[in-house]
Amino acid sequence: MIKINIVELLKRKQKTKYWLKQQMNITSRNLNRIINGETSSISFKYIEELCEYLDCTVNELIILEKEQKK
């Protein structure tokens, strides 16, 4: 499972989701969908902007979590 690590990176930078949404010119709904993993794709433009505003690498932003077998 792929996780987008926005919340932790915002905490590290001491910024809010509102600040990030303003910087990226994105709606709250779309930002929350990305954060909550409710989207099946994310554009390279958003990945690049997230890394720029959160001052992180792609490896810090996108985390691959292994799913537990049932």
Image (cartoon, rainbow, N blue to C red):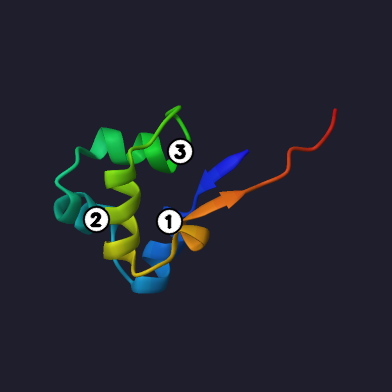
Residue 53 rendering spot, x and y as whole percentages: 27, 63
Q: Amino acid at mark 3?
A: Asn
Q: Amino acid at mark 2?
A: Leu
Residue 14 rendering spot, x and y as whole percentages: 33, 71
Q: Earlier in the sequence, mark 3 or mark 1?
A: 1
Which residue is located at x 84 percent, y 32 percent? 69
Q: Under tag 2, what secondary structure?
A: helix
Of residue 43 and residue 54, the one placed in the foreground of this image is 43
Which quarter of the rendering shows the N terminus? Answer: top right
Residue 22 rendering spot, x and y as whole percentages: 15, 52
Which residue is located at x 39 percent, y 39 percent? 34
Q: Residues within 10 Å of mark 3 (few under 14, many from 20)?
A: some
Q: Which mark is residue 7?
A: 1
Q: Earlier in the sequence, mark 3 or mark 2?
A: 2
Q: Residues within 10 Å of mark 1 (few under 14, many from 20)?
A: some
The answer for how far apart the CA atoms under marks 3 and 1 are is 10 Å
Q: Is residue 16 above or below residue 30?
A: below
Q: Which residue is mark 3?
A: 36
Q: Left or right of 28: which side holds 11?
A: right
Q: Which mark is residue 20?
A: 2
Residue 59 rendering spot, x and y as whole percentages: 52, 60
The tally of labels here is 3
Q: Under tag 1, what secondary structure?
A: helix
Labelled pair 1, 2 in contact (Cβ < 8 Å) = no
Q: Residues within 10 Å of mark 2 (few under 14, many from 20)?
A: some
